[in-house]
């Protein structure tokens, strides 16, 4: 970001903290990214949370956060990051927690960092960024700095340790400047944060998707299974080099230049197209390099033969994406539209709507929140956790915090070791839960850019 935007600003110094290591290995982090963090996925460890986790209090008349005991001291410090952009640091409770009581204490403490973007005064835009490509991971501090942003937080859930070759691949919807770069899952927990950067309007929606490829000359069609995710070879055909002889159902996957410099390699077929959708080359094995104006279709299993048939005589194809929300309303892809994936609404229509749940995902963890207020302000917030100086929040407590911050619409973004907030110069605002406050490499970030 332009250094002059932050030069001379007084920003609250972070408190020194003692980090308590998480009980699980990074790949099992219940508040982090990856399929293990998604209650709808096979790898999720639905271990019961410790008994005695307190429920959040009712909203308090004094405006303090409704978590923990009512007599706790709460201190708030405000600083300006840019015109119309305010950072509020909330420290609730003063006594460090006993490491054995982090999940159950009613004394906290909690450290919450809140960025509020007042669109009446702000001179910028909110959007997402994933760095050089979708497949790799980067630190939030690096994403914010390289994007030239003022401030940002981590965003989507991503494959993390589930796919070491492409760890940054989102687990769910991702949209970049009006282009669908990852399809939503069918998980009931998935909620998408849609950002219209042209107006800085945010909405939280449950989005469904269907995609297909159509040959312009023959009108033959082929449904898409994924967008920018490695195709899976059917188990029955795992050792078959020529996938066109496989009779088991495989995948048809669309790859755009957002994914990486090269597409995933392996058995199957791949067809590369130019920007107009016309065939450039056909490959009998998967894996090729795409230019910025090309896209590719890969197929495994019996879909390999179907893809070759669709493009047997070259020609051109059209890509079709149909997105709808849970009200049945179409979600139009347009320039300036961005989207990241969260897990569970926190508030909707000004009411807390987070569902009941058990297991480590719903227990106390570091959290990242995004949402909007009734008067249109955009809010990004982080809650530090798993530390003696900030214990983190349950899903119920997270929703209570969102409600107390005035968020009428809000969503729980990736959390756990992924939770991070950084300034434009790359310095951290919060304290991540990694060893000695180390940042995790993440898939994308939600950032605020200056525009005028």
Image (cartoon, rainbow, N blue to C red):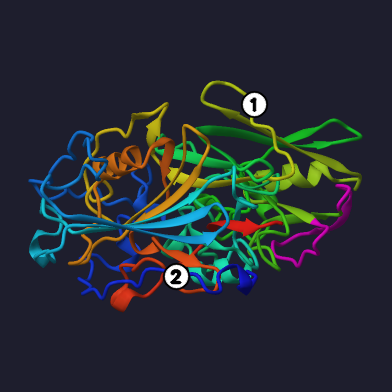
In the drawing, what numbered circle is on residue 231?
none
Q: Is residue 45 magenta?
A: no
Give the residue pinned by disc 1: 330
Q: Which residue sits at x=50%, y=70%?
A: 9
Dividing the picture into quadrants, the one containing residue 61 is top left
Quarter of the image that includes the N terminus: bottom right
- Front-most of residues 443 and 404: 404
Q: Which residue sits at x=46%, y=47%?
A: 379
Q: Residue 192: where, in percent of width, then height?
A: 51, 40
Give the residue pinned by disc 2: 10
- Front-most of residues 14 and 343: 14
Report the magenta stretch's main SS. loop
Quarter of the image that includes the C terminus: bottom right
Q: Residue 345: where, in percent of width, then height?
A: 40, 36
Instruction: Provide the secondary structure element on which disc 1 rests.
Output: loop
Dividing the picture into quadrants, the one containing residue 383 is bottom left
Magenta region: 275-294
For marks 1 and 2 on the same chain, the one whose residue lies earlier in the sequence = 2
Tell me: 232 left or right of 34.
right
Instruction: Provide the secondary structure element on which disc 2 rests.
Output: loop
Q: Which residue sits at x=13%, y=52%?
A: 72
């Amino acid at each position: 970001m332009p250094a002059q935007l932050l030069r001379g600003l007084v920003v609250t110094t972070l408190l020194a903290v003692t980090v308590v290591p998480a009980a699980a290995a990074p790949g099992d982090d219940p508040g982090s990214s990856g399929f293990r963090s998604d209650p709808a996925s096979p790898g999720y460890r639905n271990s019961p949370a410790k008994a005695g986790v307190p429920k959040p209090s009712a909203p308090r008349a004094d405006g303090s956060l409704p978590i923990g005991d009512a007599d706790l001291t709460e201190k708030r410090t405000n600083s300006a990051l840019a015109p119309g952009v305010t950072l509020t640091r909330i420290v609730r409770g003063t006594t460090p927690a006993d490491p054995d009581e982090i999940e159950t204490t009613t004394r906290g403490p909690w450290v919450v960092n809140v960025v509020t973007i007042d669109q009446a005064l702000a001179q910028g835009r909110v959007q997402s960024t994933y760095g050089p490509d979708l497949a790799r991971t980067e630190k939030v501090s690096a994403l914010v700095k390289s994007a030239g942003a003022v401030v940002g937080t981590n965003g989507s859930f991503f494959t993390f340790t589930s796919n070491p070759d492409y760890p940054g691949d989102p687990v769910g919807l991702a949209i970049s400047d009006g282009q669908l770069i990852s399809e939503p899952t069918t998980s009931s927990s998935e909620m998408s944060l849609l950002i219209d950067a042209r107006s800085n309007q945010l909405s939280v929606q449950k989005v469904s998707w269907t995609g297909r490829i159509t040959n312009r000359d023959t009108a033959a069609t082929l449904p898409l299974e994924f967008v920018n995710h490695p195709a899976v070879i059917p188990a029955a055909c795992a050792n078959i080099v020529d996938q066109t002889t496989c009779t088991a159902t495989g995948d048809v996957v669309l790859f755009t230049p957002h994914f990486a410099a090269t597409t995933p390699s392996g058995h199957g077929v791949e067809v590369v197209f130019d920007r107009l959708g016309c065939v450039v080359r056909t490959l009998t094995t998967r894996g090729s390099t795409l230019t910025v104006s090309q896209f590719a279709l890969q197929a495994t299993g019996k879909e390999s033969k179907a893809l070759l048939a669709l493009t047997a005589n070259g020609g051109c194809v059209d890509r079709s994406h149909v997105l709808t929300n849970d009200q049945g309303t179409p979600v139009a892809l347009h320039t300036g539209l961005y989207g990241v994936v969260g897990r569970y609404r926190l508030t909707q229509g000004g009411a807390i709507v987070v569902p009941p749940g058990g297991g480590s995902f719903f227990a106390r963890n570091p959290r990242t929140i995004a949402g909007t207020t009734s008067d249109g302000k955009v809010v990004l917030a982080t809650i530090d956790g798993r530390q003696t100086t900030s214990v983190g929040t349950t899903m119920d407590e997270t929703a209570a915090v969102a409600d107390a911050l005035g968020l009428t619409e809000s969503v729980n973004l990736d959390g756990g070791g992924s939770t991070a907030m950084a300034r434009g110069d790359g310095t951290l605002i919060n304290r991540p839960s990694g060893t000695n406050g180390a940042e995790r490499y993440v898939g994308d970030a939600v950032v605020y850019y200056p525009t005028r």
